[in-house]
Amino acid sequence: MNKNIIKKKIYIKTWGCQMNDHDSSIVANILTQTNDYVVTKSPEISDILILNTCSIREKAQEKLFHQLGRWKKLKQKKPSILIAVGGCVAVQEGENIYKRAKFINIIFGPQTLHKLPKLIKQSYKNNNLIIDIKTKSLKKFNHSINKKINQKFTSFVTIIEGCNKYCSFCIVPYTRGAETSRNQKDILLEINKLTKIGVREIILLGQNVNAYRTYDVINKKKYNFSDLLYSISEIPKIDRIRYITSHPMEFSDDIIEAYKYIPQLTNFLHLPVQSGSNKILKLMKRGYSIEDYENIINKLKSIRPKISISSDFIVGFPGENDHDFQKTLQFISKINFDTSYSFIYSKRPGTRAAKLIDNTPIEEKKNRLAILQKKIIQQSFQWRRRMLGTTQSVLVEGYIKNNTQNLYGRTENNRIVYFKGKNELIGKLVSLKITDINYHTYLKGNIDKNQ
Ligand code: SAH
Ligand code: F3S
């Protein structure tokens, strides 16, 4: 008998950041490993529907109930469907979700997702609502996943969960809890395993990766983020190391110095500054000034002159006036950011900023966001233009769709390059001379004969 026939079908919908995407991969991995479940791409044919939510911005609750409304209809047709709601909104809202949507079965949190096989079994047995949101231990770390992104050569590896920074606008410390670092031995083991399935680039994941701290029992000393970077750099076959996200407050000199000794660290850094006004940074409780930030970048540039920097920005924070906004624009020019994620401030219940007076009209905020984004797009294009004629290190991902002549890969600053090359280059780093650029999409290159 085909075993698949008896497997329950699960459908997972995810909103939010890379951490949430990664959490959903862990959920899929944990459930399929039990051999009782198979992941599908369609809620209509599934037995279990899982919603992994995010509450970082906007009316997350409304979006949630909208989605649940659609699933309610499916459940009316097929009452045996089991619905589980997880992620940050689940932690924030807990039982309130059930009060408005009595047809759901399980509420779980980012820290309890590894318990899902048990919770699902329990739910089938008792048919009661199960809420399991908070836990102190991070057992989910034990469920490492050997999954490559898009079947390519890059993989995420979680190194730390939670956040202790309490930026005044942010909900994360309330939903994902305090910073908890994963044991370094497990991280290194996972990366070693990943190299065996072809992974060449890893992205270390955490709300605050540079807050990483554990203890080295063998050498009896503290072990921090830069120690971890050095350890990873010794793993053969890891050609590139990236991480998201780091915080300027703990971007210490030892991390900067690592850029001197670890060539695998890419010439690209995402370091969110949020605003170019010290007044606003103070209100945001970010713990650094724009001068501190600039200092970090200058030190990095003295080691890696070509490093490209990206950031997150919040516009329309309570108290931000036009003068503050102009300072942000000036700072964007000064640092010459390559890319950014930018958002209009969104009031999050329970955070400190929620108490601040916010009297900037939404139209004005939208206007500021449009100006900021236009500026960044222009700068980003200039970065792209300057790549013309240069030699770039590219990690080759494969052939372009429907094309057996041209390969493509990614530069350190995340630009896609098309080039002619042979099969054996897939999964390797090559040096490409950039011969053509266009505004929005890919670059073209040739294999650098001097490499
Ligand atoms: N430690 C992570 C934070 C994750 S949140 C980091 O530094 O990237 C990702 C981004 O969402 C933040 O950098 C911030 O720019 C944005 N953000 C967080 N809370 C927000 C809010 N209440 N309104 C608007 N943007 C917010
Ligand atoms: Fe949020 Fe600030 Fe932490 S943005 S995740 S509280 S560093």
Image (cartoon, grey):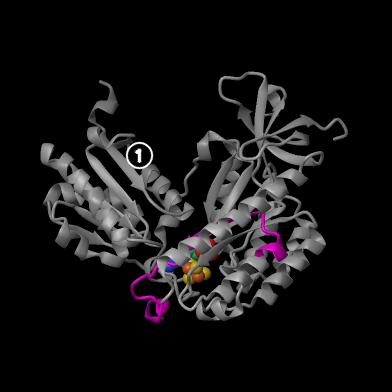
The image position of residue 5, as x and y in percent, is 24, 26
SS under mark 1: helix
Depth check: 125 or 168 in front? 168
Q: Is residue 287 left or right of residue 449?
A: left
Query: Considering only vertical position in the picture, is 110 above or below 21?
Result: below
- Residue found at the far right of this picture: 450
* Residue type, numbered disc 1: Thr
Residue 356 included in the magenta stretch of the image: yes
Could one spot residue 105 in this view of the protein? yes
Of 244 and 201, nearer the camera is 244
Highlighted magenta segment, given as a residue range = 332-358
Q: What residue is drawn where x is 70% and y is 58%?
A: 230
In this rendering, position of residue 10 left or right of residue 218: left
- Identify residue for label 1: 32
Is residue 434 a member of the stretch shown in magenta? Answer: no
Say whether residue 181 is visible.
Answer: no
Query: Is the residue marked by circle 1 packed among few (<14), some (14-19), or many (20+) residues within 10 Å?
Result: some
Q: Position of residue 432 (x, y in %)?
A: 77, 35
User: Is residue 433 shown left or right of residue 325?
Assistant: right
Residue at position x 58%, y 42% from top? Answer: 154
Q: Is residue 329 above or below residue 19?
A: below
Across and down, in percent, residue 50 comes to 29, 47
In the rendered image, the quadrant that contains the N terminus is top left
